[in-house]
Image (cartoon, coloured by chain):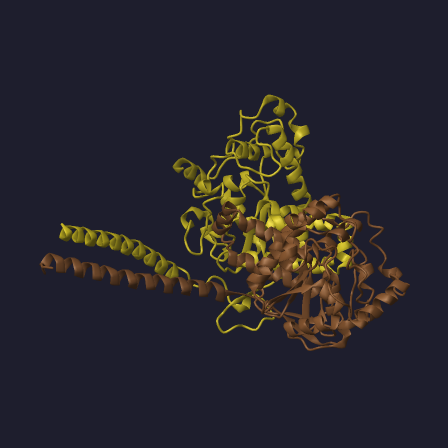
Amino acid sequence: MVGKLKQNLLLACLAISSATVFYLGQHAMECHHRMEQRPPRGDSAAATPGTAPRANGSAPYSKDMPLIFIGGVPRSGTTLMRAMLDAHPDVRCGEETRVIPRILAVKQMWARSSKEKIRLDEAGVTDDVLDSAMQAFLLEIIVKHGEPARYLCNKDPFALKSLTYLARIFPNAKFLLMVRDGRASVHSMISRKVTIAGFDLNSYRDCLTKWNRAIETMYNQCMEVGFQRCMLVHYEQLVLHPERWMRTLLKFLHIPWNQAVLHHEEMIGKAGGVSLSKVERSTDQVIKPVNVEALSKWVGKIPADVLQDMPVIAPMLAKLGYDPYANPPNYGKPDQKVLENTRRV
Amino acid sequence: MRVTTRRVLLLLGSVAALMVTLHLGQQVLECQQVLSERRHRLMRPKNEELVMVDANRVEYRYSKDMPLIFIGGVPRSGTTLMRAMLDAHPEVRCGEETRIIPRVLAMRQAWSKSGREKMRLDEAGVTDQVLDAAMQAFILEVIAKHGEPARYLCNKDPFTLKSSVYLSRLFPNSKFLLMVRDGRASVHSMITRKVTIAGFDLNSYRDCLTKWNKAIEVMYSQCLEIGRARCLPVYYEQLVLHPERSMHNIMRFLDISWSDTVLHHEELIGKPGGVSLSKIERSTDQVIKPVNMEALSKWIGHIPGDVLQDMAHIAPMLARLGYDPYANPPNYGHPDPLVVNNTHRVLKGDYKTPANLKGHLQVTQNTSSSH
């Protein structure tokens, strides 16, 4: 009896250890794969002028580095945009940090309240001091939450509510403001139940009103910093003509062209590629190649009374080039490649 | 036990499996280490240290390893007096309350408290390590740049000591001074002077004492956790009754050489290298005066009878900290002659708030600290 127990125990141990071996083996293989696949990304000290090159080839980061900020109203293609850029070997955006918009919002509150501003100035916490502190905080998060790269990028949709401020504290930063037909964005957040602070997901009218306010703020700031630093990217145009727009984008960013940006779906989860977060709401969509699935899903879903009042509820639609009465507007004809992708998807 | 081929094979098999497991595990660990090293090696801040230059062109270098001093406690516990006395030392600079440091500390705490949020942040690569680096950077910039450079930098924001354990981790060479005062006196001060503090109902002695108790309990337990070598509770009453003895003790604790100036902070108000005061801080009008006993027992006779009766129950920290909850007032001790002299001069009216520091009365609502 005891002998059999001992044998069973030994068998169990063997089973467990084989499972462990299998798991570890897989892990080790992955790890080695990553090690080989990843030659140190980006140039070394030559990236920033005036810095002594370090023996170990580290790239220094500072407030003067060429950062890229991607944002817009959520559900406007921000994740697609950052994923396509992530596919470029010299660029790393990474996931939404979540904390960057929060600290920016808090900083904005301190600056807006004149009473608080006086108190802070009295304490020696002047605008300069605040700016230094914000630069330091934001840089640490952006640099350290993902892999190193020559061009670092950050995508937190509502960070661009502080676009002009970011442009000031990071003088070499550039901005990509994702713009999309508000009706499509709103339909997406409502049907997918994407919680966004301040948006009442039970009301198309409310969401469109909030969409309008948000995009107006960001749009105005984008215009304020100027076309050399901020570029509007229309989601519809990006998915219909990805090559044309990616070429324009990369030129705007002064980043050399790389074919990989047109095939971001092949770089998901790979080292030097696109790192996705399990908890982000667009992850399941962005693992697919660029396609036109989401363009006109909103048609027929918006209540009639809202449709009627559309230009009054959302004047930014017309301003951004979307006909408020067309359901849907003619966004354009997709490239051949995109048609193929959509068929495959 | 009989030695059969089967048994031997089983044994050999399990030993082999064990060895392979160990080997693979070691490889994975090594691999991960190399990867993380690579990551860290590849991005370094352009300037590893903050460099500040003072009026005499002397350079001061700051980093997270510098010997920072954090002063805090429940508001109205002598925190401003403590920092003013230290400010009087030529090598120390505290400066005014930054107001924002407690706020970002509270935000940081909120982010890691929610399990769900922590998971989401980890998924985004925003791990504790990353957040800590960002906090170090932010706090250092504020502390270093909101006042004059000095060899020893210090920060006084009362409620920061609710995160003293966290701060002690962020800044491994930092030290903490927890101001402790008879809760009845602190509460009387905030109520009579109408000092708004988030969460404290200034209409109720009972509520304020309860909140005082909660706050000092948190701060005191963290102080104990950090340990006597790095966190020193400073009793306000002892500081004002025996300033010389107390300051010698404090300077020894901080490992900073003695200077007589710390006993005469009132002579260095507004002077370079001295004590910089803020018009809008609520203790400014008191701290321009020399160390005195005016405020020790003002609370006598002002606390409602029912609260006095329940005192030990409402505020158990009183007894824990050494204040008799039923004595009104306790015998705090006998003042040094220096203090008797100072108090005499103050009561005569020798110290009036200078015009350039008068200001908080014009600001209708002034929140002393955030909770």
From the image, state the color of chain A. Answer: yellow
Total labels drawn: 0
Q: Residue at x 68, y 28 (%)?
A: A312
List x then y, in percent, for residue A300: 53, 24
In the current view of this chain or complex, which residue is farthest to the top? A304
Q: Quadrant of residue B225?
A: bottom right
| Residue B86 vertical placement versus B164 (above, below) | below
| Chain coloured brown in the rendered structure | B
B29 left or right of A76?
Answer: left
The front one of A263 and A98 is: A98
Q: In this view of the protein, can residue B198 be seen by the observer?
A: no
| Residue B31 vertical placement versus A297 (above, below) | below
B118 left or right of B67?
Answer: left
Q: Residue at x 74, y 54 (%)?
A: B328
A3 left or right of A66?
Answer: left
Q: In this view of the protein, can residue A273 be seen by the observer?
A: yes
List x then y, in percent, for residue B252: 65, 74
Quadrant of the snapshot with the C terminus of chain A: top left
List x then y, in percent, for residue B323: 68, 58
Q: Quadrant of residue B24?
A: bottom left
The front one of B63 and A271 is: B63
List x then y, in percent, for residue A81: 52, 46
The front one of B247 and B324 is: B324
| Residue A333 vertical placement versus B72 (above, below) | above
